[in-house]
Image: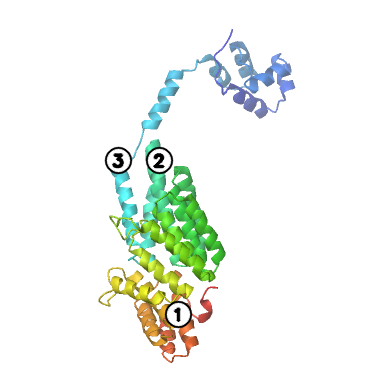
Amino acid sequence: MASSADPRFGAALREFRERRGLSLRSLGQLAHRSKSHLHELEAGLKAPTVDTARHSDRILDAGGVLARLVDAPIDHAAEAGELRARVAASDVSGEVLERIEQGVDDLASSYPTMAPADLLPLVRRHLAYVVRLLDGRVTLAQQRRLLVAGGWLAVLRATVHIDLRQRGAAAAHLRAARELAEHAEHAEIQAWCLETRAWDVLTQGDYRTALDLSHQAQRVAPKGSSARIQATAQEARAWARIGDVAATRRALERVERLTANLPVPERAEHHYRYDPAKAAAYMATTLAWAGDPAAEQVARAVLTDLDPHGDGGARPRRSASARLDLGLALVAADQPDEAVALGAQAVASGRVVPSNWWRAAELLAKVEQSGVPEAAMLRDLCVEYAPARRLTADSTPG
């Protein structure tokens, strides 16, 4: 009698045989079947008869499992219906997904103004919630939206860990962000992971690796995306630190072309949406690092725009960085007195994040080399405000 055997029959037969410690030959002798016939059954090359299945079930004491796999016809319509039901089933509403995505944008927009230590627990809680939802019942479309949200949160969390100089944690979350982005097939998040790594190694003085990662990010990033622009700006910074002024200017020119017709994003403060206004600030930093005489004029314009009243402005962290940039440009222009004053304002603002303290150290080292007496005051401030450890001139990367 022919059967409509479940394709799981062969695996079940092998499992019960091995559980009894029987070889194929031994089972064949007990069941009066050839070794080759049993091998074909286990490999799924042949369907068992109902009699063979029942006989094997009794010999192996399988409790009717083998017999049921053969006796019960496969209901293909029912299996297909179950698949469709699973695709459609979800414990997550559209409203919940929209709130999650809105939360991602809110956190990314808080990054420029909120202290890293305050932002980190908020990102962590939001990410944990996304993970819990991924463990539940979600449709394929909902799963992708959750993976994308998780990817953005993971790369943001890594960035905050970098700001706090927690590089082990940052590396772990960058790996998680990359994997989530790969599952979601989201190229821009993948590019931001590479760009974020480029910035991290740049601050540690590994300029060639930063350059390579910036190039990788540009290749991965979608055309016209914020990630591609930012990665190009990061390339310019790497060239500046290497000391290749010509390559630095070429990269800056590409940034200028990429941002020439770029509209101001709806939320300009969003960390992952390139604001054309950032271009001047990046240029000021890059030219200052490259020692280009044009740095002073650009840096002054940036600081005036960010902080017209001298109170930190709407983006106090950027203002602090702009003061450090202008300070470096002024030292290069043989104006160390004003450079010290700007450095003191930046440090005393409390807005220089831990990952940026090496820039304050670099300015300190340069004004001390100039021999200006006021440098001692800047050193005292740096020691007072530096996070976790005393700042020394030797802490400058490279």
**Splitting the image into 4 quarters, where does residue 347 fall?**
bottom left
Three-letter residue code for mark 2: Gln
Q: Earlier in the sequence, mark 2 or mark 1?
A: 2
Three-letter residue code for mark 1: Leu
Q: Is residue 358 left or right of residue 100?
A: right
Q: Would residue 328 be seen by someone viewing this image from the given angle?
A: yes
- Tell me residue 381's x, y (percent): 40, 83
Q: Which residue is mark 2?
A: 143
Gap between marks 3 and 2 measured at Cα: 12 Å
Q: Earlier in the sequence, mark 3 or mark 1?
A: 3
Q: Earlier in the sequence, mark 3 or mark 2?
A: 3
In the image, what residue occupies the spot 52% across and 58% down? 213
Label 3 Cα neighbours within 10 Å, binned few <14 / some 14-19 / many ≥20: few
Q: Which residue is mark 1?
A: 363
Q: Quadrant of the C terminus?
A: bottom right
Label 1 Cα neighbours within 10 Å, binned few <14 / some 14-19 / many ≥20: many
- Frontmost residue, 132 versus 349: 349
- Frontmost residue, 5 versus 189: 189
- Tell me residue 176's x, y (percent): 48, 51
- Tag in front: 3 or 1: 1
* SS under mark 3: helix
In the image, what residue occupies the spot 49% across and 51% down? 219
Q: Residue furthest left?
A: 309
**Splitting the image into 4 quarters, where does residue 20 fall?**
top right
Q: Quadrant of the N terminus?
A: top right
- Tell me residue 154's x, y (percent): 43, 54
Q: Which residue is mark 3?
A: 94
